[in-house]
Every structure is written in structure tokens, then in C-alpha cells.
Image: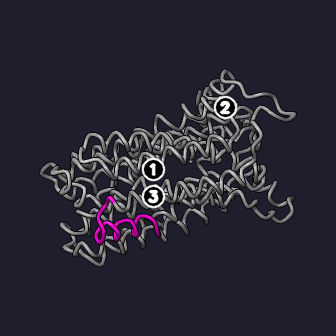
Amino acid sequence: MTATIPPAAPSPAPSPDAASSTASALAPAPAKLPAVTYVLTAGTFLMGTTEFVVAGLLPAVAADFSVSIAAAGLAITVFAIGMIIGAPTMALATLRVPHRVTLTAALLVFAVGHAIGALTPDYAVLLGTRVLTAIATGAFWAVASVAAVNAAGPRASSRALGVVLGGGMLANVLGVPLGAFAGQVIGWRGTFWALALLAAVLCVAVARSVPGTSPADGPAPAPSIRAELASLHSGRLWLVLATCAMVTGGVLSIYSFISPILTDAAGLPQSWVPAALMGFGIAALIGSVLGGRMGDTHPLATPLVTSIATLVVALALFQFAAVPAAALVLFVLLGLVGLSANPVLVGLANRYGGEASTLATAMPTSIFNLGTAIGTGIAGAGLASGLGTRGPLLVGAVGAALVLIPLGLLILRERGAHPVR
């Protein structure tokens, strides 16, 4: 993945690309983002780390609990399911709760869940803690997205979201590779303890920097669950959400199983996996920041271009996964283009939610993870089938192709050529 939102709900008139280009030409230089943006980014860094650090620890987790690697991949899938539940439900449940309280409570639950996960000898309990921490993560991402938009203001909303969501990408640069490396040195449980400790420390920073006022305070109308649910009536919003699901379903099907892909298909040693994850993360961070900047002026063109590029890279990776150098380069390129439009998609959801857009802004977090859950579930089945490591690659390529369907319909809708209700 914050109360009232920037631009009003769009009308069938000019497209977002044209309207925001005109506004950008007349507006002064972008203002500096508020400091709270970077505190929230630290939170999404932790959340992004825990969601996918298991991808680099699959062999260790599988060996510890005596399960298959495909079964160990369920730790990623169930986390995504928890995020699906947590983001929208917690956004509504905390609608009138001060953002500071919600974010701090989410971090505390996150810390406790990881501590329990690090202690348990039971794989079912581990999966349960993954769901618990995922719900807390969903709450944090949802509220952090709205808080970032509110703090930055309408003109810098996509830029602020690019930075905050970039925390998740930074997790892929530092958190996930370091977690994978730590797992090889001190065990995966040590990685979980580190996440628990960092979350507890971040609680202090959140308590000091995030405003303590309730979203219901101030001159704006008090938040209303009915109004929030009514914001989901937008056909454009659901096309954006469908695009979100396809984006992560495709890209993360490959990312989540990159360890067996690189070691079994490409023949690389396990020690190369953290480096590959870091390369993906650096590229994804760059792509997220650039995508956020481009999205303020080209909110439709940006996801279209990156989606086409992602499809090309996914097909190439499917074809050349057995070539070590090609597999590494293509995996990094997948990071650069695959998730770079996510801040733009969140910004579009925010816009299409209209005035009551807290839920609309939270929904992409849920839907991103719905795509992840479905994609990794199918990819795990593909890995366990006769396709082997080609299974996740095939799922990723198909997902990348499917992105173009809802995104294309959205573009046609905006240009008035294909009305969607």
C-alpha cells in the first residue's frame, strides 16, 4: 500500500494523463516531503522484509520443520492471505482511531508475532503467526498509505506514495538479502528475532512523529463506513484493483521461488541467491521511485509501458532461465519494471475513491496480496508438478500478460471509447 484524498473523483471528461499534465505545467516546483513520510517508509521496509524474507530462507525453513520446499512456500502464501484480510478490514475498523494509535499497535502485534514464530517448533503455529503478523502488516500499510497522502497533499501524493511504497522495495535491497544471509549464518529464527526487535524500536519513532489527532477531527466530514463502502461503486476503481492483482500475481510468482529457480534451473550455488535478491531489490527501488514521479503526470501511460516491459522480461526469463548470466540479468530487470507502477496504481485508487477514499486507498494493498496469494499458490503447485522450476516462470509470464486486460479497459474508459459500469 489517511483520510480525505487529493483530486475529486474523476469525471468522464479529460483523461488523468491530460489533466495532470496541465496541472503540472501550471504548478510550482514540488515541495519537500514531510519527515513523517520517511518514518512510514521505515515501517514499510520492515513489512516488506518479513513478507518475502522467507523466499530466501525456504530450504532452511523446510529442513527445520521437515516439510517440502513447496510446502514451506505456504509461509509466503498465508502471509499474503492475512494481508488480504487485514488491509481493508483494519482500514474500516480503525476509521475513527488516530493514525498514531493504529500504526503503533500494528508494529507491536508485528513484533509479538515474530517472537512467537521464532520460538515455535510447530509448523502450523508458524503459519498462524504469519497470518497474525500479516493482518498487522495490512493495517500498517493501509493506514500508512492514507497518512502519507494526507501529509504530502494532492500535488505530491504519488511522489509520497512512491517513497513510502519504496520502503517495501528497499526491503528487497537490504532486508530480504540480509535476512537470507543471516538465515544462512545464524538460522532463520535469528532473522525473525531481528524483525521483532526492530519493530519494537520503530514504535517509538511512530509515536513521536505521526499526528495523534483522530481522522474525525477537523473541518472535514467525519469518516463514515457507509461512505467508504460507497466509494467501491466505481468501475474504474475495480479495473485498477484487477490490474494490481495481475501485477503482483505475475511478478511475485517468480520472485517467491527464485531460490530453486536459480539453483536448480540455472545451476547457481545457494550463496548467489542473496546477491540476486539484492539486485532485484535495488532495481525495484529505483523503479518504484521513478514510477511514482512519472505517475504524477502520466498516471495511465506509466503502468502501460511498465506492464509491456514486464511481459517481455518474463517471457525472456522463461526462455533463458537455464543460462546463469541471463537468468540473473533478467531477474534484476524484472525488479526494475515489474513493480514500478504500484505507487501510481495506489494513487489512481485513491483518486477514484473520491472524498471517502480511505478504504479505496487500502484496497490495493489487499489486492496486491490477493494476486500474490493466488500467484504463489499456483506457482508452488507448478513447482511441485512435472514442470519443476519452469512452473513458477510460466505462471509469472501468464500473469504479466493478463495485466494488459484490465489496464487496457481502464485506458479505454478514460478516453471515452469503451464505457465501463
Q: Which residue is mark 3?
A: 195
Residues at discs 1 and 3 in contact (Cβ within 8 Å): no
The residue nearer to you, when weighing 405 against 2, is: 2
The residue nearer to you, when weighing 263 against 319, is: 263
What are the residue bounds of the magenta stretch? 173-189
Q: Quadrant location of the C terminus?
A: top right
Residue 287, position as x, y percentages in the image: 54, 65
Front position among marks 3 and 2: 3
SS for tag 1? Answer: helix
The span from disc 3 to disc 2 (Cα, nearest Å) is 27 Å
Q: Residue furthest bottom?
A: 325
Q: Which residue is mark 2?
A: 95
| Disc marking residue 370 | none
Lower sequence index among marks 2 and 1: 2
Q: Which residue is mark 1?
A: 247
Residue at position x 82%, y 61% from top? 25
